[in-house]
Amino acid sequence: MEFKDYYQVLGVARAATQDEVRKAFRKLARKYHPDVSKEPDAEARMKEINEANAVLSDVEKRAAYDQLGSGHRSGEEFRPPPDWDAGFEFSGQEFSPREAAEFSDFFAQIFGGKGGAQGFRAHPGQHAQGEDHHAKVVLDIEDSFSGATRQISLRVPRLDEGGHVVLDTRTLKVKIPRGVRAGQIVRLAGQGTPGYQGGPSGNLLLEVQFRPHPRLRADGRDLVMKLPLAPWEAALGAVIPVDTPGSTLNVHIPPGARGGQRLRVRGKGLPSEPLGDLWLDLFIVVPPADTLRAKELYEIMAREMAFDARKTS
Protein backbone atom coordinates (compact mmCIF):
# COMPACT_ATOMS: atom_id res chain seq x y z
CA MET A 1 0.00 0.00 0.00
CA GLU A 2 1.30 3.46 -0.92
CA PHE A 3 1.41 6.29 1.59
CA LYS A 4 -0.80 9.29 0.73
CA ASP A 5 0.54 12.76 1.54
CA TYR A 6 -2.70 14.68 1.94
CA TYR A 7 -0.90 17.96 2.63
CA GLN A 8 0.87 17.64 -0.71
CA VAL A 9 -2.44 16.91 -2.47
CA LEU A 10 -4.00 20.13 -1.14
CA GLY A 11 -0.79 22.12 -1.45
CA VAL A 12 -0.69 23.27 2.19
CA ALA A 13 1.96 23.09 4.90
CA ARG A 14 1.64 20.62 7.75
CA ALA A 15 1.32 23.60 10.10
CA ALA A 16 -1.62 25.02 8.12
CA THR A 17 -4.66 26.19 10.05
CA GLN A 18 -8.03 24.60 9.44
CA ASP A 19 -9.09 27.78 7.63
CA GLU A 20 -6.10 27.47 5.28
CA VAL A 21 -7.03 23.85 4.58
CA ARG A 22 -10.59 24.89 3.79
CA LYS A 23 -9.48 27.65 1.42
CA ALA A 24 -7.03 25.34 -0.38
CA PHE A 25 -9.76 22.76 -0.91
CA ARG A 26 -12.20 25.30 -2.32
CA LYS A 27 -9.59 26.67 -4.73
CA LEU A 28 -8.73 23.20 -6.05
CA ALA A 29 -12.39 22.19 -6.25
CA ARG A 30 -13.12 25.16 -8.50
CA LYS A 31 -10.27 24.08 -10.78
CA TYR A 32 -10.86 20.33 -10.93
CA HIS A 33 -14.56 19.71 -10.37
CA PRO A 34 -15.59 17.53 -13.36
CA ASP A 35 -18.68 19.65 -14.02
CA VAL A 36 -16.63 22.74 -14.82
CA SER A 37 -13.02 21.63 -15.35
CA LYS A 38 -11.42 21.10 -18.74
CA GLU A 39 -8.37 19.34 -17.24
CA PRO A 40 -7.99 15.83 -18.74
CA ASP A 41 -7.47 14.22 -15.32
CA ALA A 42 -10.09 16.30 -13.51
CA GLU A 43 -12.16 13.39 -12.21
CA ALA A 44 -9.17 11.52 -10.74
CA ARG A 45 -7.69 14.69 -9.26
CA MET A 46 -11.02 15.66 -7.71
CA LYS A 47 -11.28 12.26 -6.07
CA GLU A 48 -7.79 12.74 -4.55
CA ILE A 49 -8.70 16.25 -3.41
CA ASN A 50 -11.93 15.07 -1.79
CA GLU A 51 -10.09 12.30 0.02
CA ALA A 52 -7.40 14.65 1.34
CA ASN A 53 -10.06 17.11 2.47
CA ALA A 54 -12.05 14.38 4.23
CA VAL A 55 -9.01 13.80 6.45
CA LEU A 56 -7.47 17.24 6.91
CA SER A 57 -10.75 19.12 7.37
CA ASP A 58 -11.68 16.83 10.27
CA VAL A 59 -9.80 17.70 13.46
CA GLU A 60 -9.80 14.15 14.82
CA LYS A 61 -8.75 12.38 11.64
CA ARG A 62 -6.11 15.02 10.95
CA ALA A 63 -4.56 14.56 14.41
CA ALA A 64 -4.44 10.78 13.96
CA TYR A 65 -3.03 11.12 10.42
CA ASP A 66 -0.32 13.52 11.63
CA GLN A 67 0.91 10.98 14.15
CA LEU A 68 0.73 8.04 11.76
CA GLY A 69 2.29 9.83 8.79
CA SER A 70 5.19 11.55 10.50
CA GLY A 71 8.35 10.90 8.51
CA HIS A 72 6.66 9.22 5.53
CA ARG A 73 6.69 10.43 1.94
CA SER A 74 4.02 10.21 -0.71
CA GLY A 75 4.14 7.03 -2.79
CA GLU A 76 6.46 5.04 -0.55
CA GLU A 77 5.47 1.55 0.58
CA PHE A 78 3.57 1.83 3.84
CA ARG A 79 2.00 -0.47 6.41
CA PRO A 80 0.41 1.02 9.53
CA PRO A 81 1.80 -0.37 12.80
CA PRO A 82 -0.58 -2.59 14.79
CA ASP A 83 -2.90 -0.60 17.07
CA TRP A 84 -1.40 2.69 15.84
CA ASP A 85 -4.63 4.47 16.80
CA ALA A 86 -4.79 3.16 20.37
CA GLY A 87 -5.30 5.97 22.85
CA PHE A 88 -6.98 8.40 20.42
CA GLU A 89 -10.47 9.47 21.42
CA PHE A 90 -12.87 9.85 18.49
CA SER A 91 -16.41 11.18 18.52
CA GLY A 92 -19.40 10.64 16.28
CA GLN A 93 -20.27 8.00 13.73
CA GLU A 94 -17.88 5.52 12.14
CA PHE A 95 -17.44 5.14 8.41
CA SER A 96 -18.93 1.95 7.06
CA PRO A 97 -16.63 -0.20 4.91
CA ARG A 98 -18.71 0.89 1.90
CA GLU A 99 -18.25 4.59 2.69
CA ALA A 100 -14.51 4.17 3.30
CA ALA A 101 -14.15 2.25 0.02
CA GLU A 102 -15.19 5.34 -1.96
CA PHE A 103 -11.61 6.58 -1.51
CA SER A 104 -8.23 4.83 -1.81
CA ASP A 105 -7.12 1.64 -0.08
CA PHE A 106 -4.94 3.85 2.12
CA PHE A 107 -7.98 5.76 3.39
CA ALA A 108 -10.09 2.62 3.80
CA GLN A 109 -7.44 0.84 5.87
CA ILE A 110 -6.56 3.83 8.04
CA PHE A 111 -9.89 5.58 8.48
CA GLY A 112 -12.50 2.92 7.85
CA GLY A 113 -14.18 3.07 11.26
CA LYS A 114 -12.97 6.55 12.25
CA GLY A 115 -15.77 9.09 11.97
CA GLY A 116 -15.76 12.75 12.81
CA ALA A 117 -17.95 14.61 15.25
CA GLN A 118 -21.61 14.46 14.19
CA GLY A 119 -23.36 16.65 16.76
CA PHE A 120 -26.62 15.49 18.35
CA ARG A 121 -29.17 12.99 17.16
CA ALA A 122 -32.19 15.17 17.87
CA HIS A 123 -34.21 18.11 16.59
CA PRO A 124 -33.68 21.58 18.09
CA GLY A 125 -35.54 22.06 21.34
CA GLN A 126 -35.33 18.44 22.41
CA HIS A 127 -33.45 17.17 25.45
CA ALA A 128 -30.93 15.16 23.46
CA GLN A 129 -28.32 12.71 24.62
CA GLY A 130 -24.77 13.66 23.70
CA GLU A 131 -22.79 11.68 21.15
CA ASP A 132 -20.89 8.58 22.18
CA HIS A 133 -17.11 8.71 21.89
CA HIS A 134 -14.93 5.72 21.11
CA ALA A 135 -11.30 4.77 21.60
CA LYS A 136 -9.09 1.71 21.43
CA VAL A 137 -7.17 0.50 24.50
CA VAL A 138 -4.45 -2.15 24.47
CA LEU A 139 -4.25 -4.55 27.43
CA ASP A 140 -2.26 -7.61 28.41
CA ILE A 141 -3.88 -11.03 27.96
CA GLU A 142 -3.23 -11.58 31.66
CA ASP A 143 -5.76 -8.81 32.46
CA SER A 144 -8.52 -11.04 31.11
CA PHE A 145 -7.72 -13.75 33.67
CA SER A 146 -7.67 -11.56 36.74
CA GLY A 147 -9.71 -8.52 35.79
CA ALA A 148 -7.98 -5.24 36.44
CA THR A 149 -8.36 -1.57 37.19
CA ARG A 150 -6.22 0.41 34.77
CA GLN A 151 -5.46 4.09 34.46
CA ILE A 152 -5.60 5.04 30.80
CA SER A 153 -4.67 8.29 29.07
CA LEU A 154 -6.57 9.34 25.96
CA ARG A 155 -5.48 11.98 23.45
CA VAL A 156 -8.33 14.32 22.56
CA PRO A 157 -7.83 16.52 19.46
CA ARG A 158 -9.18 20.09 19.41
CA LEU A 159 -8.56 23.43 17.68
CA ASP A 160 -6.64 26.12 19.53
CA GLU A 161 -7.45 29.83 19.21
CA GLY A 162 -5.23 30.12 16.14
CA GLY A 163 -7.06 27.36 14.28
CA HIS A 164 -4.30 24.75 14.72
CA VAL A 165 -4.93 21.15 15.74
CA VAL A 166 -3.61 20.35 19.22
CA LEU A 167 -3.96 17.35 21.50
CA ASP A 168 -5.29 17.44 25.04
CA THR A 169 -4.92 14.46 27.37
CA ARG A 170 -7.48 13.15 29.78
CA THR A 171 -6.87 10.31 32.22
CA LEU A 172 -9.52 7.84 33.35
CA LYS A 173 -9.59 4.92 35.77
CA VAL A 174 -11.17 1.95 34.02
CA LYS A 175 -12.34 -1.35 35.50
CA ILE A 176 -11.52 -4.20 33.13
CA PRO A 177 -13.91 -7.14 33.60
CA ARG A 178 -12.56 -10.67 34.00
CA GLY A 179 -12.89 -12.65 30.78
CA VAL A 180 -12.69 -9.61 28.49
CA ARG A 181 -11.96 -10.47 24.84
CA ALA A 182 -10.22 -8.65 22.01
CA GLY A 183 -12.82 -6.56 20.19
CA GLN A 184 -15.10 -6.36 23.23
CA ILE A 185 -16.47 -2.93 24.16
CA VAL A 186 -16.12 -1.57 27.70
CA ARG A 187 -18.72 1.15 28.25
CA LEU A 188 -18.01 4.17 30.46
CA ALA A 189 -21.33 5.87 31.07
CA GLY A 190 -21.49 9.64 30.75
CA GLN A 191 -17.94 10.10 29.43
CA GLY A 192 -18.92 11.17 25.92
CA THR A 193 -20.22 14.47 24.57
CA PRO A 194 -22.35 16.50 27.05
CA GLY A 195 -26.09 16.36 26.42
CA TYR A 196 -28.14 19.09 24.73
CA GLN A 197 -30.53 21.26 26.77
CA GLY A 198 -30.21 19.13 29.88
CA GLY A 199 -30.08 15.78 28.11
CA PRO A 200 -27.73 13.05 29.39
CA SER A 201 -24.12 12.90 28.28
CA GLY A 202 -23.02 10.31 25.78
CA ASN A 203 -20.85 7.34 26.67
CA LEU A 204 -17.22 6.47 26.04
CA LEU A 205 -16.90 3.11 24.30
CA LEU A 206 -13.50 1.49 24.72
CA GLU A 207 -12.59 -1.25 22.25
CA VAL A 208 -10.22 -3.75 23.86
CA GLN A 209 -7.21 -5.18 22.04
CA PHE A 210 -4.39 -7.32 23.42
CA ARG A 211 -0.68 -6.60 23.24
CA PRO A 212 1.40 -9.22 21.43
CA HIS A 213 2.31 -12.00 23.86
CA PRO A 214 5.57 -13.96 23.61
CA ARG A 215 3.80 -17.33 23.76
CA LEU A 216 0.06 -16.87 23.35
CA ARG A 217 -2.37 -15.54 20.79
CA ALA A 218 -6.01 -14.84 21.54
CA ASP A 219 -8.59 -15.96 18.97
CA GLY A 220 -11.96 -14.85 20.26
CA ARG A 221 -12.48 -16.75 23.51
CA ASP A 222 -9.75 -19.26 22.64
CA LEU A 223 -6.02 -19.13 23.22
CA VAL A 224 -3.49 -20.53 20.75
CA MET A 225 0.02 -21.53 21.79
CA LYS A 226 2.97 -23.25 20.11
CA LEU A 227 4.20 -26.22 22.13
CA PRO A 228 7.70 -27.55 21.42
CA LEU A 229 8.30 -31.28 21.94
CA ALA A 230 11.41 -33.44 22.04
CA PRO A 231 11.32 -36.30 19.50
CA TRP A 232 10.89 -38.92 22.25
CA GLU A 233 8.02 -36.97 23.83
CA ALA A 234 6.23 -36.98 20.50
CA ALA A 235 7.02 -40.62 19.72
CA LEU A 236 6.34 -42.15 23.15
CA GLY A 237 3.80 -39.71 24.54
CA ALA A 238 4.37 -37.57 27.62
CA VAL A 239 2.78 -35.35 30.22
CA ILE A 240 3.99 -31.80 29.58
CA PRO A 241 3.54 -28.85 31.96
CA VAL A 242 2.08 -25.87 30.08
CA ASP A 243 2.05 -22.44 31.69
CA THR A 244 -0.94 -20.22 30.95
CA PRO A 245 -1.90 -16.93 32.62
CA GLY A 246 -4.56 -18.82 34.57
CA SER A 247 -2.57 -21.82 35.82
CA THR A 248 -0.02 -24.48 34.97
CA LEU A 249 -1.66 -27.37 33.13
CA ASN A 250 -0.42 -30.95 32.81
CA VAL A 251 -1.16 -31.76 29.18
CA HIS A 252 -1.14 -35.37 27.96
CA ILE A 253 0.64 -35.77 24.62
CA PRO A 254 -0.55 -38.96 22.86
CA PRO A 255 2.07 -41.40 21.54
CA GLY A 256 2.89 -40.80 17.90
CA ALA A 257 2.18 -37.06 18.00
CA ARG A 258 3.39 -35.23 14.89
CA GLY A 259 4.68 -31.76 14.17
CA GLY A 260 1.88 -29.54 12.87
CA GLN A 261 -0.75 -31.43 14.89
CA ARG A 262 -3.11 -29.33 17.02
CA LEU A 263 -4.36 -30.43 20.43
CA ARG A 264 -7.43 -28.99 22.15
CA VAL A 265 -7.65 -28.47 25.90
CA ARG A 266 -11.28 -27.66 26.64
CA GLY A 267 -12.19 -24.80 28.94
CA LYS A 268 -8.64 -23.49 29.34
CA GLY A 269 -8.85 -20.45 27.09
CA LEU A 270 -10.06 -17.05 28.26
CA PRO A 271 -12.28 -17.19 31.37
CA SER A 272 -15.28 -15.78 29.49
CA GLU A 273 -18.87 -17.00 29.39
CA PRO A 274 -18.79 -19.57 27.92
CA LEU A 275 -15.21 -20.59 28.60
CA GLY A 276 -12.77 -20.60 25.71
CA ASP A 277 -10.43 -23.46 24.81
CA LEU A 278 -6.65 -23.71 24.65
CA TRP A 279 -5.23 -24.90 21.31
CA LEU A 280 -1.69 -26.27 21.27
CA ASP A 281 0.18 -26.32 17.96
CA LEU A 282 2.84 -29.01 18.25
CA PHE A 283 6.27 -28.78 16.70
CA ILE A 284 9.26 -31.08 17.10
CA VAL A 285 12.59 -29.71 18.25
CA VAL A 286 15.56 -31.87 17.17
CA PRO A 287 18.38 -31.86 19.73
CA PRO A 288 21.81 -30.94 18.33
CA ALA A 289 24.58 -33.53 17.99
CA ASP A 290 26.99 -31.21 19.77
CA THR A 291 28.64 -33.69 22.19
CA LEU A 292 30.39 -37.02 21.70
CA ARG A 293 27.61 -38.86 23.53
CA ALA A 294 24.90 -37.14 21.50
CA LYS A 295 26.65 -38.20 18.29
CA GLU A 296 26.88 -41.80 19.56
CA LEU A 297 23.15 -41.87 20.31
CA TYR A 298 22.32 -40.56 16.84
CA GLU A 299 24.61 -43.19 15.30
CA ILE A 300 22.83 -45.93 17.27
CA MET A 301 19.45 -44.66 16.04
CA ALA A 302 20.74 -44.52 12.47
CA ARG A 303 21.91 -48.16 12.65
CA GLU A 304 19.07 -49.74 14.58
CA MET A 305 15.94 -47.85 13.53
CA ALA A 306 14.39 -48.79 10.20
CA PHE A 307 13.44 -45.23 9.37
CA ASP A 308 13.64 -43.36 6.09
CA ALA A 309 12.48 -39.73 6.39
CA ARG A 310 12.00 -39.47 2.60
CA LYS A 311 9.42 -42.25 2.67
CA THR A 312 7.24 -40.81 5.41
CA SER A 313 4.04 -39.10 4.44
Image (cartoon, rainbow, N blue to C red):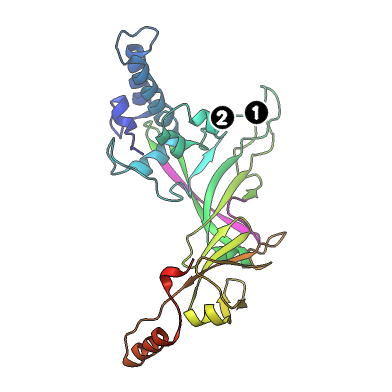
Which residue corresponds to mark 1? 121
Query: Is 175 colored magenta in this rendering?
Result: yes
Taking the view exactly as shown, the residue that stands out farthest to the bottom is 293
Q: Given the image, on which type of amino acid does mark 1 rest?
A: Arg
- Seen in the picture, residue 13 relative to 261 is either above or below; the reply is above
Q: Residue 142 location, x and y as percent?
A: 57, 66
- Seen in the picture, residue 14 relative to 214 is either above or below; the reply is above
For the point 34% across and 31% down, which residue is it?
6
Which residue corresponds to mark 2? 118
Q: Is residue 118 left or right of residue 81?
A: right
For the point 47% across and 26% down, which residue is it?
102
For the point 42% across and 41% down, which residue is it?
64
Mark 2 → mark 1, Cα distance in angstroms: 8 Å
Position of the N terminus, as image quadrant, is: top left
For the point 36% across and 20% down, which residue is it?
44
Report the magenta residues as a range. 167-184
- Quadrant location of residue 195? top right
> Is disc 2 in contact with disc 1, using a CB cutoff of under 8 Å?
yes
Q: Given the image, on which type of amino acid does mark 2 rest?
A: Gln
Which secondary structure lies at badge 1?
A: loop
Q: Residue 204 location, x and y as percent?
A: 60, 45
Q: Residue 270 location, x and y as percent?
A: 63, 63
Query: Is 3 colored magenta in this rendering?
Result: no
Q: Is residue 150 left or right of residue 102?
A: right
**Closest to the observer: 11 or 273?**
273
